[in-house]
Amino acid sequence: MPPLVPRPTEAAFRPGHFTLDDDTALHIGAGAEPAAELLRTLLSPATGLSLRPSPDGRFTLALDPGLGDLGGLGEEGYVLIVDPHAVLLRAAHPTGLLRGIQTIRQLLPPQALSEIPQPGTRWLLPCVDITDVPHHPWRGAMLDVARHFQPVSYLRRYVDLLALHKISVFHLHLTDDQGWRMPVAAYPKLTEIGGHRAESQIGPAGSGTYDGVPHGGSYTRAELTDLVRYAAARGVTVMPEIEMPGHVRAALAAYPQLGNHPERTLDVWTRWGVCDTVLGVHDEVLDFCRTVLDEVMDVFPSPYIHVGGEECPTAEWTHSVAARERAAAEGLPNPEALHGWFLGQIGDFLVRNGRHPVGWAETGAELPLDFTVMTWRDPSHTLAAARRGHPVVSAYHRATYLDYAQSDDPHEPPAQPGTVVDLRAVHDHDPVPEDADIETAGRVLGTQVQLWTEFVSTPAHIEYLTYPRLCALADRGWSGATDWADFRSRLDGHTARLDALGVRRHP
Protein backbone atom coordinates (compact mmCIF):
# COMPACT_ATOMS: atom_id res chain seq x y z
CA MET A 1 0.00 0.00 0.00
CA PRO A 2 1.70 3.23 -1.11
CA PRO A 3 1.98 5.80 1.70
CA LEU A 4 -0.10 8.82 0.67
CA VAL A 5 0.58 12.37 1.90
CA PRO A 6 -1.82 13.88 2.69
CA ARG A 7 -3.82 10.90 3.91
CA PRO A 8 -7.08 10.42 1.98
CA THR A 9 -10.41 10.45 3.78
CA GLU A 10 -11.21 6.85 2.82
CA ALA A 11 -8.98 4.35 1.03
CA ALA A 12 -9.59 0.63 0.60
CA PHE A 13 -6.79 -1.22 -1.22
CA ARG A 14 -7.48 -4.50 -3.01
CA PRO A 15 -5.30 -7.15 -4.65
CA GLY A 16 -4.14 -6.49 -8.19
CA HIS A 17 -3.03 -3.53 -10.23
CA PHE A 18 -3.70 -1.54 -13.39
CA THR A 19 -0.74 -1.20 -15.75
CA LEU A 20 -0.05 2.05 -17.58
CA ASP A 21 1.70 1.33 -20.87
CA ASP A 22 1.85 2.44 -24.48
CA ASP A 23 -1.66 1.11 -25.07
CA THR A 24 -3.21 3.12 -22.24
CA ALA A 25 -5.67 5.73 -23.53
CA LEU A 26 -7.72 8.33 -21.72
CA HIS A 27 -11.50 8.55 -21.94
CA ILE A 28 -11.93 12.27 -21.25
CA GLY A 29 -15.35 13.50 -20.20
CA ALA A 30 -16.72 16.98 -20.86
CA GLY A 31 -14.71 19.58 -18.95
CA ALA A 32 -11.99 17.11 -17.95
CA GLU A 33 -9.41 18.01 -20.61
CA PRO A 34 -7.36 20.30 -18.28
CA ALA A 35 -6.94 17.38 -15.86
CA ALA A 36 -5.94 15.08 -18.71
CA GLU A 37 -3.38 17.61 -19.90
CA LEU A 38 -1.93 17.87 -16.39
CA LEU A 39 -1.71 14.07 -16.12
CA ARG A 40 0.21 13.89 -19.39
CA THR A 41 2.49 16.80 -18.42
CA LEU A 42 3.38 15.24 -15.07
CA LEU A 43 3.86 11.62 -16.17
CA SER A 44 5.42 12.05 -19.61
CA PRO A 45 9.01 12.96 -18.55
CA ALA A 46 9.57 9.77 -16.55
CA THR A 47 7.26 7.32 -18.32
CA GLY A 48 7.36 8.49 -21.92
CA LEU A 49 3.68 7.56 -22.21
CA SER A 50 1.48 9.58 -24.58
CA LEU A 51 -1.83 8.78 -22.80
CA ARG A 52 -3.72 9.65 -25.98
CA PRO A 53 -7.44 10.44 -25.90
CA SER A 54 -9.87 7.76 -27.06
CA PRO A 55 -13.61 7.17 -26.57
CA ASP A 56 -12.67 3.57 -25.78
CA GLY A 57 -9.96 4.51 -23.27
CA ARG A 58 -9.93 2.47 -20.08
CA PHE A 59 -8.59 5.36 -17.98
CA THR A 60 -11.58 7.66 -17.46
CA LEU A 61 -11.61 11.24 -16.21
CA ALA A 62 -15.14 12.49 -15.58
CA LEU A 63 -16.91 15.50 -14.12
CA ASP A 64 -20.25 14.99 -12.39
CA PRO A 65 -21.53 18.25 -10.83
CA GLY A 66 -24.10 16.28 -8.86
CA LEU A 67 -21.30 14.88 -6.71
CA GLY A 68 -20.65 18.37 -5.28
CA ASP A 69 -23.47 19.06 -2.86
CA LEU A 70 -25.41 15.82 -3.01
CA GLY A 71 -22.32 13.63 -3.11
CA GLY A 72 -20.45 15.67 -0.54
CA LEU A 73 -17.32 16.15 -2.65
CA GLY A 74 -17.51 19.94 -2.83
CA GLU A 75 -14.98 21.79 -4.95
CA GLU A 76 -11.89 19.73 -4.19
CA GLY A 77 -13.12 16.22 -3.43
CA TYR A 78 -12.79 13.27 -5.80
CA VAL A 79 -13.49 9.55 -6.13
CA LEU A 80 -10.82 7.25 -7.56
CA ILE A 81 -11.48 3.61 -8.45
CA VAL A 82 -8.63 1.48 -9.78
CA ASP A 83 -9.43 -2.01 -11.08
CA PRO A 84 -7.13 -4.39 -12.98
CA HIS A 85 -8.68 -3.36 -16.31
CA ALA A 86 -9.91 0.21 -15.72
CA VAL A 87 -9.35 3.45 -13.84
CA LEU A 88 -12.12 5.92 -13.02
CA LEU A 89 -11.43 9.37 -11.55
CA ARG A 90 -14.58 11.39 -10.86
CA ALA A 91 -15.16 14.79 -9.28
CA ALA A 92 -17.84 17.46 -9.09
CA HIS A 93 -15.46 20.29 -9.99
CA PRO A 94 -12.34 20.51 -12.19
CA THR A 95 -10.22 21.21 -9.10
CA GLY A 96 -11.27 17.86 -7.66
CA LEU A 97 -9.90 16.11 -10.73
CA LEU A 98 -6.59 17.96 -10.28
CA ARG A 99 -6.38 16.76 -6.68
CA GLY A 100 -7.05 13.21 -7.83
CA ILE A 101 -4.28 13.45 -10.43
CA GLN A 102 -1.80 14.12 -7.61
CA THR A 103 -3.01 11.03 -5.79
CA ILE A 104 -2.50 8.96 -8.95
CA ARG A 105 1.09 10.27 -9.11
CA GLN A 106 1.67 9.12 -5.55
CA LEU A 107 0.16 5.68 -6.20
CA LEU A 108 2.68 5.03 -8.96
CA PRO A 109 6.29 4.08 -8.19
CA PRO A 110 8.30 7.08 -6.92
CA GLN A 111 10.29 7.12 -10.15
CA ALA A 112 7.15 8.44 -11.87
CA LEU A 113 7.87 11.84 -10.31
CA SER A 114 11.32 12.06 -11.86
CA GLU A 115 11.96 14.65 -14.55
CA ILE A 116 14.21 12.28 -16.52
CA PRO A 117 13.21 9.09 -18.39
CA GLN A 118 13.01 5.90 -16.33
CA PRO A 119 13.27 3.07 -18.89
CA GLY A 120 12.45 -0.42 -17.77
CA THR A 121 10.09 0.64 -14.96
CA ARG A 122 6.64 -0.96 -14.81
CA TRP A 123 4.04 1.71 -14.16
CA LEU A 124 1.62 -0.08 -11.85
CA LEU A 125 -1.36 1.48 -10.08
CA PRO A 126 -2.57 -0.62 -7.13
CA CYS A 127 -6.26 -1.50 -7.10
CA VAL A 128 -8.01 0.83 -4.68
CA ASP A 129 -11.24 2.67 -3.89
CA ILE A 130 -10.60 6.22 -2.65
CA THR A 131 -13.07 8.90 -1.60
CA ASP A 132 -11.24 12.03 -0.59
CA VAL A 133 -12.47 15.42 0.65
CA PRO A 134 -10.37 18.11 2.39
CA HIS A 135 -10.94 18.92 6.04
CA HIS A 136 -10.07 22.62 5.54
CA PRO A 137 -10.40 24.57 2.27
CA TRP A 138 -7.41 26.83 3.00
CA ARG A 139 -4.12 24.98 3.02
CA GLY A 140 -1.53 27.58 2.16
CA ALA A 141 2.16 28.33 1.82
CA MET A 142 3.62 31.84 1.97
CA LEU A 143 6.96 32.63 0.33
CA ASP A 144 8.63 35.99 0.91
CA VAL A 145 10.36 37.14 -2.27
CA ALA A 146 10.75 40.72 -1.02
CA ARG A 147 13.66 40.07 1.36
CA HIS A 148 15.36 37.75 -1.13
CA PHE A 149 14.18 37.65 -4.72
CA GLN A 150 13.64 34.33 -6.50
CA PRO A 151 13.27 33.95 -10.29
CA VAL A 152 9.89 32.97 -11.66
CA SER A 153 11.39 29.71 -12.93
CA TYR A 154 11.85 28.65 -9.31
CA LEU A 155 8.37 29.84 -8.35
CA ARG A 156 6.97 27.40 -10.90
CA ARG A 157 8.89 24.55 -9.26
CA TYR A 158 7.66 25.77 -5.87
CA VAL A 159 4.08 25.58 -7.18
CA ASP A 160 4.65 22.05 -8.51
CA LEU A 161 5.70 20.89 -5.05
CA LEU A 162 2.72 22.61 -3.43
CA ALA A 163 0.34 20.92 -5.86
CA LEU A 164 1.82 17.49 -5.13
CA HIS A 165 0.76 18.01 -1.50
CA LYS A 166 -2.69 19.39 -2.39
CA ILE A 167 -1.87 22.88 -1.11
CA SER A 168 -4.60 25.22 -2.31
CA VAL A 169 -3.10 28.73 -1.83
CA PHE A 170 0.32 30.09 -2.78
CA HIS A 171 0.66 33.32 -0.79
CA LEU A 172 3.26 35.43 -2.63
CA HIS A 173 4.75 38.18 -0.44
CA LEU A 174 5.79 40.69 -3.11
CA THR A 175 6.70 43.90 -1.25
CA ASP A 176 8.37 44.95 1.96
CA ASP A 177 10.87 47.43 3.37
CA GLN A 178 13.73 45.59 1.64
CA GLY A 179 12.33 45.26 -1.87
CA TRP A 180 9.39 45.79 -4.23
CA ARG A 181 8.95 43.01 -6.83
CA MET A 182 5.58 43.80 -8.49
CA PRO A 183 5.61 46.05 -11.58
CA VAL A 184 3.06 48.89 -11.64
CA ALA A 185 2.89 50.74 -14.95
CA ALA A 186 1.90 54.07 -13.38
CA TYR A 187 4.79 53.92 -10.89
CA PRO A 188 7.84 52.47 -12.68
CA LYS A 189 10.27 53.55 -9.94
CA LEU A 190 8.72 51.00 -7.59
CA THR A 191 10.81 48.31 -9.27
CA GLU A 192 13.50 50.52 -10.85
CA ILE A 193 14.48 51.93 -7.45
CA GLY A 194 12.46 49.96 -4.91
CA GLY A 195 13.51 46.62 -6.39
CA HIS A 196 17.17 47.07 -5.44
CA ARG A 197 19.05 47.52 -2.18
CA ALA A 198 22.72 48.27 -1.62
CA GLU A 199 23.41 45.34 0.71
CA SER A 200 21.79 43.02 3.22
CA GLN A 201 22.14 42.61 6.95
CA ILE A 202 23.89 39.49 8.16
CA GLY A 203 22.33 37.78 11.15
CA PRO A 204 19.28 38.82 13.15
CA ALA A 205 17.80 42.32 13.36
CA GLY A 206 20.16 44.70 15.09
CA SER A 207 23.35 42.79 14.30
CA GLY A 208 25.01 45.78 12.64
CA THR A 209 26.84 43.51 10.18
CA TYR A 210 26.25 43.71 6.42
CA ASP A 211 27.38 41.67 3.42
CA GLY A 212 28.26 44.56 1.10
CA VAL A 213 26.54 42.77 -1.81
CA PRO A 214 23.82 44.58 -3.82
CA HIS A 215 20.58 42.61 -4.09
CA GLY A 216 17.67 43.15 -6.43
CA GLY A 217 15.14 41.81 -8.85
CA SER A 218 11.55 42.17 -9.97
CA TYR A 219 9.03 40.34 -12.10
CA THR A 220 7.46 41.44 -15.33
CA ARG A 221 3.70 41.53 -15.63
CA ALA A 222 3.91 38.72 -18.19
CA GLU A 223 5.90 36.53 -15.80
CA LEU A 224 3.36 36.95 -13.02
CA THR A 225 0.43 36.40 -15.36
CA ASP A 226 2.01 33.19 -16.60
CA LEU A 227 2.72 32.07 -13.02
CA VAL A 228 -0.95 32.54 -12.14
CA ARG A 229 -1.98 30.48 -15.17
CA TYR A 230 0.59 27.78 -14.38
CA ALA A 231 -0.57 27.51 -10.77
CA ALA A 232 -4.27 27.46 -11.71
CA ALA A 233 -3.63 24.54 -14.07
CA ARG A 234 -2.41 22.67 -10.98
CA GLY A 235 -5.27 23.72 -8.70
CA VAL A 236 -3.27 26.36 -6.81
CA THR A 237 -4.48 29.95 -6.33
CA VAL A 238 -1.76 32.61 -6.17
CA MET A 239 -2.69 35.23 -3.58
CA PRO A 240 -0.52 38.36 -3.78
CA GLU A 241 0.50 40.41 -0.77
CA ILE A 242 1.24 44.13 -1.11
CA GLU A 243 2.18 45.56 2.28
CA MET A 244 0.57 48.75 3.63
CA PRO A 245 0.59 51.12 5.47
CA GLY A 246 3.80 49.83 7.09
CA HIS A 247 6.62 47.70 5.65
CA VAL A 248 6.82 50.19 2.75
CA ARG A 249 10.36 51.59 2.90
CA ALA A 250 11.11 50.34 -0.64
CA ALA A 251 8.08 52.22 -2.00
CA LEU A 252 9.08 55.37 -0.14
CA ALA A 253 12.62 55.16 -1.51
CA ALA A 254 11.04 55.30 -4.96
CA TYR A 255 8.37 57.92 -4.19
CA PRO A 256 9.21 59.95 -1.04
CA GLN A 257 6.08 62.09 -1.50
CA LEU A 258 4.00 59.11 -0.34
CA GLY A 259 5.52 59.31 3.13
CA ASN A 260 5.20 61.63 6.08
CA HIS A 261 8.52 63.39 5.30
CA PRO A 262 8.53 63.98 1.53
CA GLU A 263 11.61 66.15 1.85
CA ARG A 264 13.71 63.17 2.96
CA THR A 265 15.60 60.90 0.57
CA LEU A 266 15.35 57.32 1.73
CA ASP A 267 17.19 54.18 0.68
CA VAL A 268 15.66 50.75 0.27
CA TRP A 269 16.13 49.28 3.73
CA THR A 270 19.16 47.05 4.19
CA ARG A 271 18.24 45.96 7.71
CA TRP A 272 15.81 43.38 9.08
CA GLY A 273 13.16 44.09 11.68
CA VAL A 274 10.41 46.72 11.68
CA CYS A 275 11.12 50.01 9.92
CA ASP A 276 9.47 53.11 11.42
CA THR A 277 8.82 54.83 8.07
CA VAL A 278 5.22 54.34 6.94
CA LEU A 279 2.85 55.69 4.33
CA GLY A 280 1.24 59.06 4.87
CA VAL A 281 -2.52 59.36 5.03
CA HIS A 282 -3.08 62.14 2.47
CA ASP A 283 -5.27 61.65 -0.58
CA GLU A 284 -2.33 61.07 -2.93
CA VAL A 285 -1.37 57.99 -0.90
CA LEU A 286 -4.84 56.50 -1.11
CA ASP A 287 -4.86 57.14 -4.87
CA PHE A 288 -1.47 55.40 -5.11
CA CYS A 289 -2.72 52.35 -3.19
CA ARG A 290 -5.84 52.08 -5.34
CA THR A 291 -3.80 52.33 -8.54
CA VAL A 292 -1.39 49.64 -7.33
CA LEU A 293 -4.24 47.36 -6.28
CA ASP A 294 -6.02 47.90 -9.60
CA GLU A 295 -2.97 46.49 -11.35
CA VAL A 296 -2.64 43.70 -8.79
CA MET A 297 -6.24 42.68 -9.40
CA ASP A 298 -5.66 42.72 -13.16
CA VAL A 299 -2.78 40.26 -12.80
CA PHE A 300 -4.09 38.10 -9.96
CA PRO A 301 -7.69 36.81 -10.22
CA SER A 302 -7.49 35.44 -6.66
CA PRO A 303 -10.65 36.24 -4.67
CA TYR A 304 -8.33 37.18 -1.79
CA ILE A 305 -5.87 40.11 -1.88
CA HIS A 306 -3.48 40.44 1.07
CA VAL A 307 -2.54 43.98 2.14
CA GLY A 308 -0.33 43.17 5.13
CA GLY A 309 -1.37 45.67 7.78
CA GLU A 310 0.84 44.42 10.61
CA GLU A 311 3.75 45.94 12.49
CA CYS A 312 2.89 49.53 11.59
CA PRO A 313 4.60 52.08 13.88
CA THR A 314 2.47 55.19 14.32
CA ALA A 315 5.13 57.63 15.59
CA GLU A 316 5.36 59.42 12.23
CA TRP A 317 1.61 60.03 12.25
CA THR A 318 1.74 61.31 15.82
CA HIS A 319 4.35 63.90 14.84
CA SER A 320 2.80 64.81 11.48
CA VAL A 321 0.54 67.86 11.31
CA ALA A 322 -1.14 66.47 8.19
CA ALA A 323 -1.80 63.12 9.86
CA ARG A 324 -3.20 64.74 12.99
CA GLU A 325 -5.48 66.88 10.83
CA ARG A 326 -6.63 63.80 8.94
CA ALA A 327 -7.42 62.02 12.22
CA ALA A 328 -9.44 65.01 13.43
CA ALA A 329 -11.28 65.34 10.11
CA GLU A 330 -12.27 61.67 10.23
CA GLY A 331 -13.45 61.94 13.84
CA LEU A 332 -10.74 59.62 15.15
CA PRO A 333 -9.65 59.83 18.79
CA ASN A 334 -5.90 60.00 17.98
CA PRO A 335 -3.39 59.48 15.15
CA GLU A 336 -2.87 55.86 16.20
CA ALA A 337 -6.46 55.17 15.07
CA LEU A 338 -5.43 56.06 11.51
CA HIS A 339 -4.18 52.49 11.13
CA GLY A 340 -7.67 51.01 11.28
CA TRP A 341 -9.07 53.90 9.23
CA PHE A 342 -6.46 53.39 6.50
CA LEU A 343 -7.10 49.65 6.25
CA GLY A 344 -10.83 50.37 6.22
CA GLN A 345 -10.38 52.58 3.14
CA ILE A 346 -8.34 49.93 1.37
CA GLY A 347 -10.68 47.12 2.41
CA ASP A 348 -13.72 49.01 1.13
CA PHE A 349 -11.99 49.52 -2.21
CA LEU A 350 -11.24 45.81 -2.58
CA VAL A 351 -14.75 44.80 -1.55
CA ARG A 352 -16.25 47.19 -4.11
CA ASN A 353 -14.13 45.39 -6.69
CA GLY A 354 -15.41 41.99 -5.67
CA ARG A 355 -12.37 40.86 -3.68
CA HIS A 356 -11.80 39.84 -0.06
CA PRO A 357 -9.15 41.90 1.77
CA VAL A 358 -6.76 39.89 3.92
CA GLY A 359 -4.54 41.19 6.72
CA TRP A 360 -2.18 40.00 9.43
CA ALA A 361 -3.75 40.35 12.88
CA GLU A 362 -1.84 41.63 15.87
CA THR A 363 -4.63 40.78 18.32
CA GLY A 364 -7.42 39.25 16.25
CA ALA A 365 -9.75 42.15 17.01
CA GLU A 366 -8.26 45.21 15.32
CA LEU A 367 -8.93 44.71 11.60
CA PRO A 368 -12.08 45.98 9.85
CA LEU A 369 -14.87 43.41 9.84
CA ASP A 370 -14.77 42.78 6.11
CA PHE A 371 -11.20 41.46 6.37
CA THR A 372 -10.18 37.83 6.32
CA VAL A 373 -7.72 37.57 9.18
CA MET A 374 -4.40 35.77 9.41
CA THR A 375 -3.52 35.23 13.06
CA TRP A 376 0.14 34.65 13.78
CA ARG A 377 1.07 35.81 17.27
CA ASP A 378 -1.07 33.57 19.48
CA PRO A 379 -3.76 30.88 19.03
CA SER A 380 -6.12 32.91 21.23
CA HIS A 381 -6.21 35.54 18.49
CA THR A 382 -7.76 32.97 16.14
CA LEU A 383 -10.60 32.50 18.60
CA ALA A 384 -11.01 36.26 19.11
CA ALA A 385 -11.14 36.96 15.38
CA ALA A 386 -13.55 34.12 14.61
CA ARG A 387 -15.88 35.14 17.45
CA ARG A 388 -15.85 38.68 16.04
CA GLY A 389 -17.12 37.30 12.75
CA HIS A 390 -13.95 37.23 10.64
CA PRO A 391 -13.03 34.35 8.37
CA VAL A 392 -9.68 33.25 9.81
CA VAL A 393 -6.52 31.52 8.60
CA SER A 394 -4.39 30.23 11.46
CA ALA A 395 -0.70 31.00 10.93
CA TYR A 396 0.59 30.59 14.49
CA HIS A 397 4.30 31.36 14.32
CA ARG A 398 5.43 28.61 16.68
CA ALA A 399 3.83 25.99 14.44
CA THR A 400 3.93 27.42 10.91
CA TYR A 401 6.93 29.77 10.55
CA LEU A 402 9.52 27.84 8.57
CA ASP A 403 12.22 30.48 8.97
CA TYR A 404 12.70 29.08 12.49
CA ALA A 405 15.17 26.22 12.78
CA GLN A 406 13.87 22.66 12.56
CA SER A 407 16.02 21.49 15.46
CA ASP A 408 18.52 22.80 17.97
CA ASP A 409 21.37 21.00 16.20
CA PRO A 410 24.29 23.48 16.00
CA HIS A 411 24.87 22.45 12.39
CA GLU A 412 21.51 23.84 11.25
CA PRO A 413 21.87 26.76 8.80
CA PRO A 414 21.22 30.31 10.03
CA ALA A 415 17.62 30.82 11.10
CA GLN A 416 15.31 33.25 12.82
CA PRO A 417 16.29 33.18 16.50
CA GLY A 418 13.90 32.60 19.36
CA THR A 419 12.37 29.17 18.93
CA VAL A 420 12.50 25.82 17.17
CA VAL A 421 9.62 24.63 14.98
CA ASP A 422 10.12 20.94 14.44
CA LEU A 423 8.14 18.55 12.27
CA ARG A 424 5.86 17.43 15.07
CA ALA A 425 5.01 21.00 16.09
CA VAL A 426 3.69 21.60 12.57
CA HIS A 427 1.65 18.38 12.48
CA ASP A 428 0.28 18.88 16.00
CA HIS A 429 -1.11 22.32 15.20
CA ASP A 430 -4.90 22.35 15.01
CA PRO A 431 -6.02 25.61 13.36
CA VAL A 432 -9.41 25.42 15.11
CA PRO A 433 -9.16 26.66 18.73
CA GLU A 434 -10.10 24.13 21.38
CA ASP A 435 -12.76 26.42 22.88
CA ALA A 436 -14.49 27.24 19.58
CA ASP A 437 -18.16 26.38 19.26
CA ILE A 438 -19.52 25.04 15.96
CA GLU A 439 -20.30 28.47 14.51
CA THR A 440 -16.92 29.90 15.48
CA ALA A 441 -15.05 26.83 14.24
CA GLY A 442 -16.82 27.17 10.91
CA ARG A 443 -15.15 30.55 10.35
CA VAL A 444 -11.67 29.02 10.50
CA LEU A 445 -10.78 28.47 6.85
CA GLY A 446 -7.60 26.54 7.56
CA THR A 447 -3.91 27.10 8.01
CA GLN A 448 -0.68 27.80 6.14
CA VAL A 449 3.10 27.80 6.50
CA GLN A 450 5.20 30.97 6.21
CA LEU A 451 8.78 31.32 5.01
CA TRP A 452 10.21 34.76 5.63
CA THR A 453 13.54 35.02 3.83
CA GLU A 454 15.80 37.32 5.81
CA PHE A 455 18.12 34.33 6.24
CA VAL A 456 17.17 32.46 3.07
CA SER A 457 18.60 33.46 -0.30
CA THR A 458 18.71 30.28 -2.41
CA PRO A 459 16.19 27.69 -3.68
CA ALA A 460 18.20 24.96 -1.96
CA HIS A 461 17.79 26.68 1.40
CA ILE A 462 14.08 27.28 0.73
CA GLU A 463 13.51 23.58 0.14
CA TYR A 464 15.65 22.53 3.11
CA LEU A 465 13.48 24.63 5.42
CA THR A 466 10.18 23.76 3.71
CA TYR A 467 10.41 19.98 3.42
CA PRO A 468 9.30 17.86 5.08
CA ARG A 469 7.58 20.41 7.36
CA LEU A 470 5.15 21.43 4.62
CA CYS A 471 4.18 17.76 4.30
CA ALA A 472 3.04 17.88 7.94
CA LEU A 473 0.86 20.95 7.40
CA ALA A 474 -0.58 19.50 4.19
CA ASP A 475 -1.49 16.28 5.98
CA ARG A 476 -3.12 17.99 8.95
CA GLY A 477 -4.91 20.58 6.81
CA TRP A 478 -6.30 18.11 4.29
CA SER A 479 -7.11 15.10 6.45
CA GLY A 480 -7.50 16.63 9.91
CA ALA A 481 -5.64 13.53 11.11
CA THR A 482 -3.96 13.76 14.51
CA ASP A 483 -2.14 10.40 14.51
CA TRP A 484 1.52 11.37 14.61
CA ALA A 485 2.85 7.80 14.33
CA ASP A 486 0.71 7.16 11.25
CA PHE A 487 1.90 10.37 9.60
CA ARG A 488 5.52 9.65 10.47
CA SER A 489 5.24 6.19 8.92
CA ARG A 490 3.70 7.54 5.71
CA LEU A 491 6.28 10.32 5.51
CA ASP A 492 9.11 7.78 5.64
CA GLY A 493 7.78 6.35 2.38
CA HIS A 494 6.90 9.72 0.90
CA THR A 495 10.50 10.96 1.09
CA ALA A 496 11.34 8.68 -1.88
CA ARG A 497 9.05 10.91 -3.97
CA LEU A 498 10.76 14.07 -2.73
CA ASP A 499 14.12 12.50 -3.57
CA ALA A 500 12.90 11.58 -7.08
CA LEU A 501 12.02 15.25 -7.56
CA GLY A 502 15.44 16.37 -6.35
CA VAL A 503 14.04 18.18 -3.30
CA ARG A 504 16.89 19.28 -1.06
CA ARG A 505 15.03 18.38 2.11
CA HIS A 506 15.87 18.30 5.78
CA PRO A 507 16.82 14.71 6.69
Image (cartoon, helix red, strand yellow):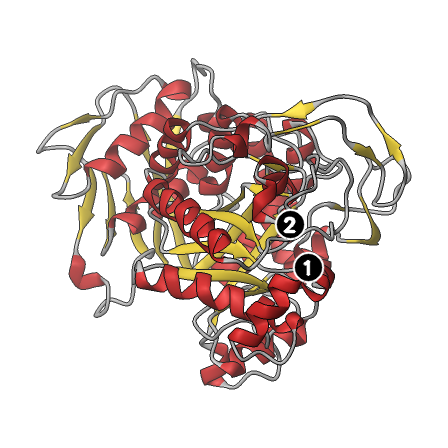
Q: Is residue 505 above or below residue 378?
A: above
Q: Secondary structure at mark 1?
A: loop
Q: Residues within 10 Å of mark 1 (few under 14, many from 20)?
A: some
Q: How many marks?
A: 2
Q: Which residue is mark 1?
A: 311
In this view, the residue farthest toward the left is 55
Q: Nearer the viewer, residue 415 or 217?
A: 217
Q: Which residue is mark 2?
A: 247
> Residue drawn 63% across and 60% down?
310
Identified by mark 2, the residue type is: His
> Residue drawn 61% across and 49% down?
259
x, y percent for residue 109: 47, 31
Q: Residues within 10 Å of mark 2 (few under 14, many from 20)?
A: many
240 lies left or right of 99: right
Identified by mark 1, the residue type is: Glu
x, y percent for residue 292: 43, 45
Task: Choose the circle earlier in sequence order: 1 or 2.
Answer: 2
Question: Residue 40 is drawn in which quadrant?
Answer: top left
413 lies left or right of 129: right
Question: What is the distance, in whole Å, between disc 1 and disc 2 at their CAs?
Answer: 8 Å
x, y percent for residue 350: 38, 59
Q: Nearer the viewer, residue 64 or 224?
A: 224
Q: Is residue 483 visible?
A: no
Q: Secondary structure at mark 2?
A: loop
> Residue drawn 35% across and 59% down?
355
Q: Is residue 52 visible?
A: yes
Q: Are marks 1 and 2 in contact (CB under 8 Å)?
A: yes
315 lies left or right of 412: left
Q: Nearer the viewer, residue 273 or 204?
A: 273
